[in-house]
Image: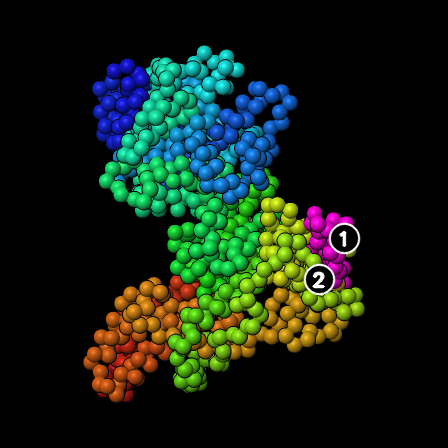
């Protein structure tokens, strides 16, 4: 077998055993001298084994490398041919310069143009359904055989460190896929230098194809850890000439090969263990990759070439979550969303987009992720949906319907290192992360659009299903009176609350804003004599009234600018968001002096009003309400919300509202026959307890009861569950990142089998005085 045939046989084989068999027959597999250390390091497992922990995230790194290779090819061709050429300073600039993509956003070109551009990068699924192989193919710069060890097989080199418009920097992320490639971690690499680059270079091998196989060798008595090696007999990459190219690109289904690859790189991952995403590539894996690459720089063409599939389509284009949501917005997103804005945290600007899905529509877009952090289009970490259930956010009714994308591309290098691990899937617990979370809590909790949606969802879910809360209030108050322990636990006492807030702020009226505002004015004026009182070390909000569209500050074309000045000096530590005619400005006060009266000025401008921008000013006084400093005896007016919090502290714990859930609506709440309670709401707005009245343990107890006893047993079950839930909600030891509602859900499910027998049995227990032993009546 000549080397070209050997290379193609390896590319066409879909099993690890098949690869090993070919290499054994060729005399390569069993001879240790044919194999060299990956990265020229014997102890390479320490770096390679410390990459991505999930197969989907590791696959993303391969795709990102292909995107980088294509961008670098276009860049180098311009460098060779145009001596006046200036290298792009960002991915956005590169996309505008190379492909005329406005603002570097794929959503600004049509589907036909994206599909055409996607021919540069392919992801092809072959092999078995249960053990798929994935081939990543790009028409990028390619590598000559001599340069493959220094690039595609290197580790920790600075090959792309100083190229400003690429994603890869650390020269190791692409190794994350190794551990997920079958038992022997086999991977095939084939590459040839781009001919337009080769003609300017002196490398004698740059017209040849080079190929190699990567494998994992297990620990031995002499070597304590695994090591990765690549095939290079006599320390040279195997090479051959093929001017006509190699038939490695997919033809029509079901043929995975047939069209010629004339240059670039072909990488095949054998028997890739990608878990639940091993179904047809144009569905689940497409959705997952879209989430992990929400604003991908270049589109990628996905091909399903495994047999015995009958989908709607065998190929599609991966363009990122932003494009998916833009194309599907009408059917999947609530009216007015996405809404966008920006925040400035510790001098780092973050642009955000909030997507609110229609009920049940988020499942194909996100799983457990609620907030994703993105740099240059790639997800680098996330916060789970439980973030929305925090008391400081209070959006549990929207937990499964919100996705927030934070674009951190403008972070400086040190901040990126402080917040993100090199695996691009983990956030580092640091002061920057904590500060971002505080900003997000405030932004989300006070976002007018989310508030309106939350109240609407809550009304839809509980209206006409509520039980009368008065009996529960009487029962619980009697229990508290007779139990010193419970009285201390619920020391604030109990009160009835109105679960449905009435808000006639125009929720049902469709808002249509102007492209440019005709006014942008303060809702309430605060001058030097009548200033706003704000608490130190908190955040305060100022509202404006306007008639502009919600995307005014963040749209790609002709956006407006909002500038804020403190005593004449421009500041950046604030956030501004627009919603249906209102703009909410949020400002932190941690760096201001107690007792100080501060003058703020705001200027709103755009291409339409450069000569006459909208200018406003307001004054605030910083106070310390904890220590009663800086108030000079001034008292806040009742209900004054000037420090960003409800100044009227709840003196009582609201009685939770009980909503019985029958078997026919289990699916809506994630219930089954064993679940007991699901809680929604917040401490500020009150809680709703959804109780499974068709729980198997409750129904079993009811079977043995007389008709007149049934209501009593049901009440014991419901009120017992409520007490348990309230105790958990009152737990002061719950960690901030722990989902307290999940804890209620799991604990009540565990207690459900014993609750009623325990109440009955302990109620019958008496102490016999003479023998000081316990007996049952």
> Is 13 or 39 nearer to us in this picture?
13
Residue 251 occupies quadrant:
top left
> Residue 714's spot in the image, x, y percent?
30, 80
Q: Which residues are magenta?
A: 591-618
Q: How many marks?
A: 2
**Residue at (36%, 69%) from the top-left corner?**
677
Residue displayed at 44% across by 59% down: 358
Q: Is residue 613 magenta?
A: yes
Q: The residue tagged with tag 2: helix, strand or loop?
A: strand
Mark 1, secondary structure of its residue: loop
| Residue at (65% x, 66% y) in the render | 643
Q: Residue at horizontal 52%, vertical 68%?
A: 508
Q: For marks 2 and 1, give the CA distance.
A: 14 Å
Please say if 247 is above or below 531.
above
Q: Does residue 355 lie above or below 481 as drawn?
A: above
Residue 542, percent across and down?
67, 63
Q: Position of residue 735 (x, y in %)?
A: 46, 60
The label nearer to you, 2 versus 1, is: 1
208 to 401, vertically: above or below: above
Farthest-out residue, left: 704
Tell me, yes or no, whether the highlighted magenta stretch contains residue 690.
no
Q: Which residue is mark 1?
A: 612
Between discs 2 and 1, the one toward the N terminus? 2
- In the picture of the structure, the residue carrying the numbered disc 2 is 521
């Amino acid at each position: 077998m000549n080397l070209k045939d050997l290379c193609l046989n390896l590319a066409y084989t879909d099993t690890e055993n098949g690869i090993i068999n070919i290499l054994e027959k060729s005399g390569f597999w069993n001879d240790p001298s044919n194999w060299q250390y990956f990265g020229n390091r014997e102890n390479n497992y320490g770096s390679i084994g410390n990459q991505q922990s999930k197969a989907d995230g590791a696959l993303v790194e391969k795709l990102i490398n292909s995107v980088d290779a294509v961008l670098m090819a276009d860049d180098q061709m311009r460098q060779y041919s145009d001596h006046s050429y200036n290298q792009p300073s960002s991915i956005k600039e590169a996309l505008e310069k190379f492909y005329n993509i406005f603002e570097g956003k794929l959503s600004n070109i049509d589907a036909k143009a994206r599909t055409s551009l996607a021919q540069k990068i392919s992801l092809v699924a072959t092999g078995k359904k249960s053990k798929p192989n994935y081939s990543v193919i790009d028409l990028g710069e390619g590598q000559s055989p001599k340069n493959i060890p220094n690039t595609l097989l290197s580790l920790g080199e600075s090959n792309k460190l100083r190229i400003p418009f690429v994603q890869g920097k650390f020269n190791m992320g692409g190794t994350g896929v190794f551990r997920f490639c079958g038992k022997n971690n086999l991977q095939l690499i084939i590459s040839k230098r781009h001919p337009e680059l080769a003609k300017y270079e002196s490398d004698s091998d740059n017209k040849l194809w080079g190929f190699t196989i990567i494998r994992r060798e297990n620990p031995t008595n002499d070597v304590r850890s695994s090591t990765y090696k690549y095939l290079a007999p006599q320390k040279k990459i195997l090479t051959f000439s093929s001017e006509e190219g190699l038939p490695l690109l997919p033809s029509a289904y079901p043929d995975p090969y047939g069209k010629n690859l004339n240059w670039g790189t072909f990488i095949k991952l054998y028997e890739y263990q990608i878990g639940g995403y091993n179904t047809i590539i144009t569905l689940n894996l497409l959705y997952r990759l879209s989430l992990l690459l929400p604003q991908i720089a270049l589109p990628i063409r996905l091909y399903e070439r495994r047999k015995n599939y009958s989908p709607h389509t065998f190929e599609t284009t991966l363009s990122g979550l932003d494009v998916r949501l833009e194309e599907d917005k009408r059917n999947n997103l609530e009216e007015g969303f996405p809404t966008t804005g920006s925040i400035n945290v510790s001098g780092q600007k973050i642009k955000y987009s909030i997507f609110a899905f229609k009920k049940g529509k988020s499942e194909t877009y996100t799983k457990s992720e609620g907030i994703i952090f993105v740099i240059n289009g790639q997800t680098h970490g996330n916060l789970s949906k439980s973030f929305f259930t925090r008391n400081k956010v209070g959006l549990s009714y929207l937990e499964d319907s919100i996705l927030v994308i934070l674009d951190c591309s403008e972070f400086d290098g040190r901040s990126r290192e402080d917040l993100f691990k090199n695996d691009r899937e983990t956030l580092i617990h640091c002061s920057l992360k904590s500060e971002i979370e505080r900003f997000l809590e405030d932004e989300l909790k006070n976002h007018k659009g989310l508030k309106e949606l939350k109240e609407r969802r809550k009304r839809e879910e509980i209206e006409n299903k509520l039980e009368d809360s008065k009996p529960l209030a009487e029962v619980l108050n009697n229990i508290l009176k007779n139990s010193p322990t419970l009285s201390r636990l619920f020391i604030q006492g109990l009160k009835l609350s109105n679960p449905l807030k009435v808000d006639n702020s125009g929720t049902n009226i469709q808002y249509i804003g102007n492209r440019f505002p005709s006014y942008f004015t303060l809702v309430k004026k605060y001058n030097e004599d009548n200033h706003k009182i704000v608490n130190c070390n908190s955040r305060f909000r100022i509202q404006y009234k306007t008639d502009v569209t919600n995307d005014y500050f963040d749209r790609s074309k002709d956006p407006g600018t909002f500038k804020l000045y403190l005593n004449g000096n421009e500041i950046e530590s604030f956030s501004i968001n627009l919603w249906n005619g209102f703009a909410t400005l949020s400002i932190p006060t941690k760096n201001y002096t107690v007792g100080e009266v501060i003058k703020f000025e705001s200027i709103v401008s755009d291409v339409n009003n450069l000569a006459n921008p909208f200018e406003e000013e307001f004054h605030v006084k910083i106070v310390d309400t904890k220590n009663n400093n800086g108030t000079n005896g001034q008292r806040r007016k009742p209900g004054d919300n000037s420090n960003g919090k409800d100044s009227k502290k709840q003196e009582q714990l609201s009685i939770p509202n009980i909503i019985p859930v029958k078997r026919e609506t289990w699916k809506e709440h994630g219930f089954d026959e064993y679940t007991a309670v699901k809680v929604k709401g917040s401490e500020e707005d009150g809680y709703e307890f959804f109780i499974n009245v068709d729980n198997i343990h409750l129904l079993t107890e009811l079977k043995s009861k007389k008709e007149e006893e049934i209501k009593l047993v049901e009440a014991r079950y419901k009120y017992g569950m409520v007490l348990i839930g309230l105790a958990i909600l009152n737990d002061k030891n719950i960690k901030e990142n722990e989902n307290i509602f999940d804890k209620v859900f799991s604990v009540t499910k565990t207690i459900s089998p014993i609750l009623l027998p325990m109440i009955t049995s302990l109620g019958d227990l008496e102490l016999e005085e003479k023998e000081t032993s316990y007996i049952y009546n």
